[in-house]
Amino acid sequence: MMKKRPLPSDKPHPVLSPTLDALLGQLRLLIQEARQQVLHAADLVHVRTGWEIGRHIVEFEQAGAERAEYGEKSISRLAESLTAEFGKGFDARNLRNMRAFYLLFPIWNALRTELSWTHYRTLLRVESESARCWYMHEAAEQNRSTRALDRQIGTLYYERLLASPD
């Protein structure tokens, strides 16, 4: 039977001098900040990749005369090939989301880089362009989680604000 390795938090912390304890605190903050930056960078690459895939699909469809007739078949065939080569995340539904993402947000520089792909997938459900932009900026400025953004959209928060006399 294999021994369970103790987690770093399971080990007792050695007693440090006050100066070493202060250094340890600074190093913890540095490492936590670095990890957050890595997560943010990964989210940004994910969003950019989804946007670029959507752009390529739209440009392919617009250049082809067979677009209307074979468009859905093309997405399905692309999904099969990409999934076989790269794994999860490239099914037909996700490719349609990427296509819709590019169509709704065609200007890369207008996007909020603070938001994740899940934020943008949630924003795809908002039909009104003005509401979608408001939710996007609100989520970024208030550092909203995707769950909070989903709740705001579900309760029509923007629309209620517009209807409010204040």
Image (cartoon, rainbow, N blue to C red):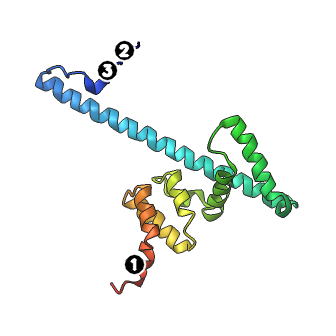
Please identify the quarter of the rendering in which residue 145 is found.
Answer: bottom left
Three-letter code, disc 3 = Pro
Identify residue type, mark 2.
Answer: Lys
Q: Position of residue 60 (x, y in %)?
A: 79, 54
The amino acid beneath tag 1 is Leu
At 83% from the left edge and 64% from the top edge, which residue is drawn? 68
Residue lying farthest to the left in this orientation: 18
Q: Is residue 158 left or right of residue 99?
A: left
Q: Residue at x 42, y 81 (%)?
A: 162
Work out whether mark 1 precedes mark 3 in sequence or the reverse, and give the earlier one.
3
Question: What's the CA distance linking mark 3 and mark 2?
Answer: 9 Å
Picture quarter containing residue 140? bottom left
Question: Quick one: SS at disc 2?
Answer: loop
Q: Quadrant of residue 31?
A: top left
Please give the label number shown on residue 6.
Answer: 3
Numbered tag placed on residue 161 in the rendering: 1
Tell which of 166 and 97 is nearer to you. 97
Dot 3 lies on which element?
loop
Q: For the C terminus, which image quadrant?
A: bottom left
How far across and how far down the image is residue 141, in percent?
39, 61
Viewer-nearest residue: 163 or 134: 163
